[in-house]
């Protein structure tokens, strides 16, 4: 039997990679993990965690305004961008330290270097030029923003990575894209006082979400003052006297202090040496894996965004735990991608789990759709015109709830709990038997007794 330097070598220090390395090391395996930038990956360093902190910051101006309706007098307020960035950086450094502490506590070797494959069992550490061998290798290098290199002037634009480190808060920003990253940052910058425009090639933002929520969020964002240009794209970005000048396909000329590209993310595999090891990738550069996250090379696995399956942090962690069960516990385990709760931390927020009405209509012969739209209690005194939307999609034959969708405050928190409910296979009758908790917005989920309408053979009846 050949001898190796390590039982497991992990390339990439994000959520999936760290979980794989830490748990394997805790099982007594000799493990090393290499990361070329910072431990924590996209989520902790330049993704969902700092983004959520920015979301909180961007909401305070509305909280100050709302306070007046409840009898509070709030004095003059001001916002310090540099102070927010510094506070965010402090928290990210703390979290990165916790990731490293967990690895060290499990006796995993922590390497701060880029690592590239030389062949199926050999890795080169670029900082020293040293090569090491491993019985098993996990590729968990994540993804990176698509630079949209075909756009003239793309080098003048930023991605979400740079948005977290801008030296100054711009007076205006144009964000290209209609996915959750673009939508979330549009709300963040607008909430911080930046004149914000969103441009998207599609007919409506958030293409894979339920239509009611897409339209409801679009209307709410426009009402707040965010400009949304659908069915249009940027054709050119140039420097102007007072910032950047953007020419669009429809002939508009726009001006902005900053242009941000949120046009999707690409698997981070370039220059990784996959071809030397014989690892197969698809046309987008994503590592091709089987149901157990194993590549076409028997001892090499891939997890997380680098496989371009479901690009979510909890999914990468789940895939890592399945890898541990498969490789080290003699319990082959496939990741379960069914009924993943999802949130868009827009303002208002979206929380969703299961099928949209459109998707369910293609899968089931007859549906019952329960829909409620109402003004939340807090808005009655604050004076805001905002509305919440709650929607349940039910298979009429089995009465099983196959989709749940919420637009409004704390939608993400509710979606997490609804994820348990739908995963357990609950029916609409189970919802109906559940006592309402009053006064809450969530009580609407268990008090919609009659369907708002039905869908039969894909058409509303």
Image (tube, grey):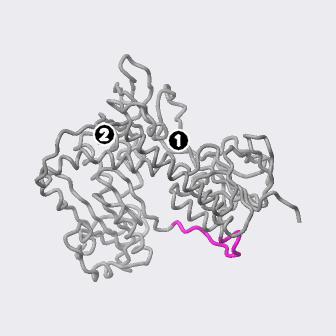
Tag 1: Cα neighbours inside 10 Å, few (<14), some, or many (≥20)?
some
Mark number, residue 145? 1
Task: Determine whether the residue tagged by mark 1 lies in a helix, strand or loop.
Answer: strand
Q: Main secondary structure of the magenta part?
A: loop
* Residue 334, x across and y down, in percent: 61, 69
In the depicted structure, whether residue 246 falls above or below residue 120? above
* Residue 60, x across and y down, in percent: 27, 47
Tag 2: Cα neighbours inside 10 Å, few (<14), some, or many (≥20)?
many
Q: Nearer the viewer, mark 1 or mark 2?
A: 2
Determine the image quadrant of residue 294. bottom right
Q: Is residue 331 magenta?
A: yes
The residue lying toward the viewer, choosing from 61 and 325, is 61
Determine the image quadrant of residue 198. top left
In the depicted structure, whether residue 143 falls above or below residue 333? above
Question: Disc 1 versus disc 2: distance between alpha carbons?
Answer: 23 Å
The residue depicted at 69 percent of the width and 74 percent of the height is 329
Q: Quadrant of the C terminus?
A: bottom left
* Residue 288, x across and y down, in percent: 66, 55
Left or right: 414 with respect to 134?
Answer: left
Q: Circle 2 sits on which residue?
A: 192
The residue depicted at 34 percent of the width and 24 percent of the height is 253
Q: State which region is magenta.
A: 325-337
Mark number, residue 18? none
Left or right: 228 with respect to 322?
Answer: left
The residue lying toward the viewer, choosing from 235 and 153, is 153
Residue extending furthest toward the right: 1
Task: Determine whether the residue tagged by mark 2 lies in a helix, strand or loop.
Answer: loop
In the depicted structure, whether residue 327 falls above or below residue 103? below
* Residue 348, x across and y down, in percent: 29, 53
């Amino acid at each position: 039997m050949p001898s190796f330097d390590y039982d497991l070598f992990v390339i990439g220090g994000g959520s999936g990679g760290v979980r794989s390395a830490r748990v394997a090391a805790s099982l007594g395996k000799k493990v090393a993990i290499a990361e070329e930038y910072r431990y924590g990956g996209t989520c902790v360093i330049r993704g969902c965690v700092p983004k959520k902190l920015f979301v909180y910051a961007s909401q305070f101006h509305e909280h100050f305004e709302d306070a007046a309706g409840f009898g509070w007098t709030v004095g003059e307020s001001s916002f310090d961008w540099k102070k927010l960035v510094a506070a965010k950086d402090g928290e990210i450094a703390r979290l990165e330290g916790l990731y490293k502490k967990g690895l060290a506590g499990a006796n995993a070797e922590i390497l701060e270097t880029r690592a590239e494959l030389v062949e199926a069992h050999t890795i080169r550490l670029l900082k020293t030029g040293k090569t090491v061998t491993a019985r098993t290798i996990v590729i968990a290098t994540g993804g990176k923003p698509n630079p949209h290199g075909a756009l003239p002037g793309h080098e003048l634009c930023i991605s979400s990575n740079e948005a977290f480190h801008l030296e100054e808060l711009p007076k205006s920003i144009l964000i290209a894209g209609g996915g959750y990253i673009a939508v979330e940052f549009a709300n963040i910058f607008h909430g911080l006082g930046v004149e914000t425009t969103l441009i998207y090639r599609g007919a409506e933002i958030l293409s894979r979400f339920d239509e009611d929520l897409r339209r409801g969020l679009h209307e709410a964002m426009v009402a707040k003052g965010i400009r949304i240009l659908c069915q249009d794209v940027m054709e050119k970005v140039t420097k102007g006297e007072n910032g950047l000048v953007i020419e669009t396909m429809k002939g508009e000329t726009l001006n902005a202090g900053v242009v941000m590209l949120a046009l999707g993310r690409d698997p981070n595999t370039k220059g990784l040496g996959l071809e030397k090891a014989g690892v197969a990738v698809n046309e987008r550069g994503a590592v091709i894996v089987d149901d157990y996250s194993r590549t076409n090379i028997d001892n090499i696995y891939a997890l997380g965004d680098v496989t371009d399956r479901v690009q979510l942090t909890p999914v990468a962690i789940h895939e890592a735990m399945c890898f541990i069960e498969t490789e080290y516990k003699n319990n082959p385990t496939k990741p379960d991608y069914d009924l993943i709760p999802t949130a868009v931390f827009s303002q208002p927020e979206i929380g969703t789990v299961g099928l949209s009405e459109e998707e369910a209509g293609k899968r089931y012969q007859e549906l019952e759709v329960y829909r409620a739209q109402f003004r939340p209690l807090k808005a009655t005194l604050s004076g805001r015109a905002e509305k919440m939307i709650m929607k349940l999609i039910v298979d009429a034959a089995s009465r099983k709830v196959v989709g749940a969708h919420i637009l409004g405050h704390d939608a993400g928190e509710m979606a997490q709990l609804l994820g348990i409910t739908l995963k357990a296979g609950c029916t609409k009758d189970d919802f109906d038997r559940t006592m309402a908790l009053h006064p809450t917005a969530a009580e609407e989920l268990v008090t919609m007794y009659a369907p708002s309408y039905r869908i039969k053979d894909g058409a509303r009846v």
